[in-house]
Amino acid sequence: MLIRIVRMTFAPEHVPAFLALFHATKHHIRQQPGCQHLELWQDAESPNIYCTHSRWDDEAALNGYRKSTLFGKVWPATKKLFAAPPVAFSSTSAGVVE
């Protein structure tokens, strides 16, 4: 499983547009082949900063989404709303649970 976190800082006036876009497309993203989970987090101290947390079967599944028509529409529309460059990273479980 691949865990993907994307931290996005929006201009405060663009937050409503981002939320509308996310809510309009989240179900379609969740239906992409290999997507196991998608949720949206809001920063506790900076309400214009959001993170998407998604889980994918593997990197190939994430890359398949990145090559999809849906991503080709969602990501450019999201990028227009940024106040700072996004920070994205992928992780896998280390298998340690205490």
Image: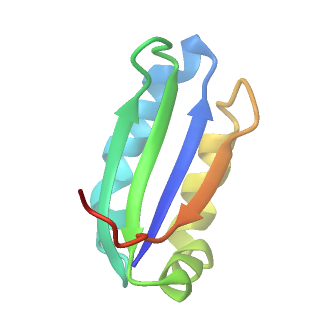
Is residue 26 shown above or below 48?
Answer: below
The quarter holding residue 73 reads bottom right
Q: Quadrant of the C terminus?
A: bottom left
Q: Nearer the viewer, residue 94 or 67?
A: 94
As drawn, the residue found furthest toward the right would be: 85
| Residue 34 rendering spot, x and y as whole percentages | 37, 83
- How many numbered marks are there? 0
Is residue 60 shown above or below 8?
Answer: below
| Residue 57 rendering spot, x and y as whole percentages | 38, 83
Q: Residue at left 56%, top 21%? A: 14
| Residue 51 rendering spot, x and y as whole percentages | 47, 39
Is residue 51 shown above or below 81?
Answer: below
Q: Residue at left 47%, top 71%? A: 92
The quarter holding residue 94 reads bottom left
Is residue 1 shown above or below 74?
Answer: below
As drawn, the residue found furthest toward the left would be: 98
Q: Residue at left 50%, top 61%? A: 4
| Residue 26 rendering spot, x and y as whole percentages | 33, 54
Q: What colour-coding does the image apply?
A: rainbow
Q: Nearer the viewer, residue 72 or 47?
A: 47
Q: Quadrant of the N terminus?
A: bottom left
The quarter holding residue 54 reads bottom left
As drawn, the residue found furthest toward the bottom would be: 60
* Residue 49 appears left or right of 67: left
